[in-house]
Image (cartoon, grey):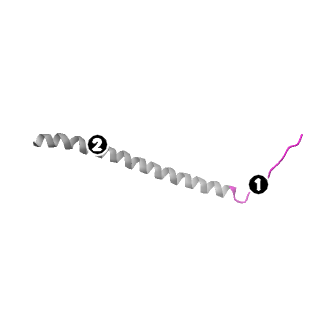
């Protein structure tokens, strides 16, 4: 009986650990990516402030 419990819980616990570690890693990368995108958008908005957009037409 004890052996069957150990044979069940050992793979169960190890799979749970690896799945949770993968999930947490994905969450961290997603969070970092969102922060980097937000920072790059803030930087691009700051770069465009104060510039005047002009439109030029070339006629033949």
Secondary structure of the residue carrying tag 1 is: loop
In space, the residues marked 2 and 1 are separated at their CA atoms by 56 Å
Kindly check if marks 2 and 1 are in contact, taking CB atoms under 8 A apart as contact.
Answer: no
Q: Where is residue 35 in the image (x, y as percent from the top left)?
A: 51, 54
Q: Residues within 10 Å of mark 2 (few under 14, many from 20)?
A: few
Residue 42 to residue 16: above or below: below
Q: Residue furthest left?
A: 1
x and y, in percent, of residue 3 in the image: 12, 40
Q: Which residue lies furthest to the right in this view?
A: 60
Question: Which residue position is annotated with label 1?
Answer: 53
Indicate yes or no whether the magenta region holds residue 54: yes
For the C terminus, the image quarter is top right
Task: Say whether disc 2 or disc 1 marks the residue closer to the N-terminus.
Answer: 2
- In the displayed structure image, the side of residue 19 where residue 7 appears, left or right: left
- What secondary structure is found at the residue carrying circle 2? helix
Asked whether, in this view, residue 17 is left or right of residue 32, the answer is left
* Numbered tag placed on residue 15 in the rendering: 2
Where is residue 41 shown, x and y percent of the image?
Answer: 60, 54
- Residue placed most toward the observer, 38 or 19: 19
Residue at the spot 62% in from the left edge and 55% down from the top edge: 43
Residue shown at 69% from the left, 59% from the top: 49
So how many labels did they put on this image? 2
Main SS class of the magenta portion in the image: loop
Q: Alpha-carbon neighbours of circle 1 within 10 Å: few (<14), some, or many (≥20)?
A: few
Boundaries of the magenta span:
48-60
Q: In this view, does 54 lie to the left or right of 39?
A: right
Q: Which residue is drawn at 84% across and 46% down?
A: 57
Residue 1 found in image quarter: top left
Query: Of the numbered discs in the image, which one, if any, rests on residue 38?
Result: none
Residue 13 falls in which quadrant of the image? top left
Q: Residue 36 lies in magenta, yes or no? A: no
Q: Can you give x and y, in whole percent of width and height, for residue 45 in the image?
A: 65, 57
């Amino acid at each position: 009986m004890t052996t069957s419990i150990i044979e069940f819980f050992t793979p169960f616990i190890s799979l749970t650990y690896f799945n949770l570690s993968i999930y947490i890693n994905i969450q961290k990368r997603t969070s970092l990516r969102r922060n980097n995108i937000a920072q790059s958008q803030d930087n691009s908005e700051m770069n465009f402030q104060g510039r005047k957009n002009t439109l030029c037409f070339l006629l033949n």
